Amino acid sequence: MTEPAVEVSASPQDPRPLGSVVAERYELRRVLGRGGAAVVFAAEHVLVRRPVALKLPLRTPEMRELLDARLRRETQALAHVRHPAIVDVIDAGEDGNMPYLAMELLEGRTLTGLISARVKLEPDDVVKIGVELAEGLGAVHGAGVIHRDVKPGNVLITRSPLNQIHLCDFGIAQLQGPHTQFDRKLTQAGAILGTPEYMSMEAFVSGPDADHRVDIFALGISLFECLTGAVPVEGALGAILRQRSLNKMPALQEIRPDVPASLAAVVARCTAAEPAGRFQSMSEVAQALRACTRKPLDSIDLLRSAASPAAQQAARPGADAIAARRAFPRAPFVTVATLQRSNGATADARLEDLSEGGVLLVAREQFPPGESVRLRFGLPISGRVFAVNAVVRWSRTGRGAPATGLEFMDLPDAARGEIRQYVALMSNARNTAAR
């Protein structure tokens, strides 16, 4: 079987092609994530061969100054905080006139991907997630930083350390002290600081003048989504603002009666309309969440292979196809992927789960079971980008992020060996961390 050709660039819009070296230090291996402000690459230090996550700003001419400022802001915010739930900064600087930020490379699954795959999370899982995020955000607030974009898409769950929660993306964080020109420029331009579905009313109205309690509200919305599979209101900005102004938050237990009343009460208090009605600190949130379960949090495996009975039921139809895909050992693996569909159209997606048998994708659109596609993504160890034929085995809709299971049809031997090696390494890391 002929190996597919190696591709040398990730996307025409990316600031640097794969294989290039930034600041004479970091070789770009594969794309981990791509947003409106920056691209995050898996990279490797060319001398010590240490893997890192390297963040580079997008350099559109009209937004260059603002996007560069966002990356510098993230560097400053992360430099203030040290906590297991916050990604560590390794290096920062400029290559020419382009800033870069090097962080520890974490392999795992985003919380968005976990919600999409399981539909609704178990209450004890949500308690663990909430406690670790609250404790991490408590350290962030104690350092004089407000995150301002807390949401499942900015949360990574790693295999090693075992089930460690990491909060990422501090690009719009607010640092303690006088508001900078960057803050004022954003608000004067009418930009929204955050993701509307997770923002409190004062975050919309006050912008950079809102305090740390905007993060408490966003954490509450995130926990609501973990438990129900959806945010309280989504869609047009007008609909979100109308819901916030009317203060009509859906009753969590009416949507999901099996959620303990104590946990529902914590979520309700986090999402109170007025800041004074919420918990006043993240330590209060963490303490209240710990009281919602008797299970030791260290014993909860968020990335366990077997879905709960409730999740298995919610996942049907398609459970048989999922079981077939899981005949191969698998591991969480986040990277950007592209699908070429049978009609010739292309679609971007995020790969969340990898095995020799196939992958789990999270995308903006849903793909019908049985459709043949051409999948392109970077391999987990070498970073080599390759293409493989696959077929859609199952698909189900989450909140704006449908999950899709693909089965490989013609995986080359070299790619199969690398995937097998990666899955074994991740399994060994998990077993070592569990001992």
Image (cartoon, rainbow, N blue to C red):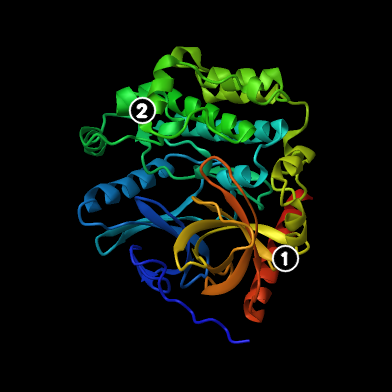
For numbered disc 1, what is the local secondary structure?
helix
Q: Residues within 10 Å of mark 2 (few under 14, many from 20)?
A: few
Residue 57's x, y, as percent? 33, 55
Residue 354 visible in the displayed image: no
* Residue designated by label 2: 238
Q: Residues within 10 Å of mark 1 (few under 14, many from 20)?
A: some
Residue 360's x, y, as percent? 62, 57
What amino acid is labelled 1 in the image? Ala
Residue 410's x, y, as percent? 64, 76
- Residue pictured at 46% horizontal, 68% vertical: 344
What amino acid is labelled 2 in the image? Gly
Q: Name above or below for residue 378 compared with residue 53.
A: below
- Residue pictured at 40% horizontal, 27% vertical: 239
Considering the image in quadrants, where does the N terminus appear? Answer: bottom right
Residue 205's x, y, as percent? 31, 23
Residue farthest along the bottom direction in this orientation: 2
Q: Nearer the viewer, residue 221 or 177?
A: 221
- Disc 1 to disc 2, C-alpha distance: 48 Å
**Quadrant of residue 122 in the image?**
top right
* Residue designated by label 1: 424
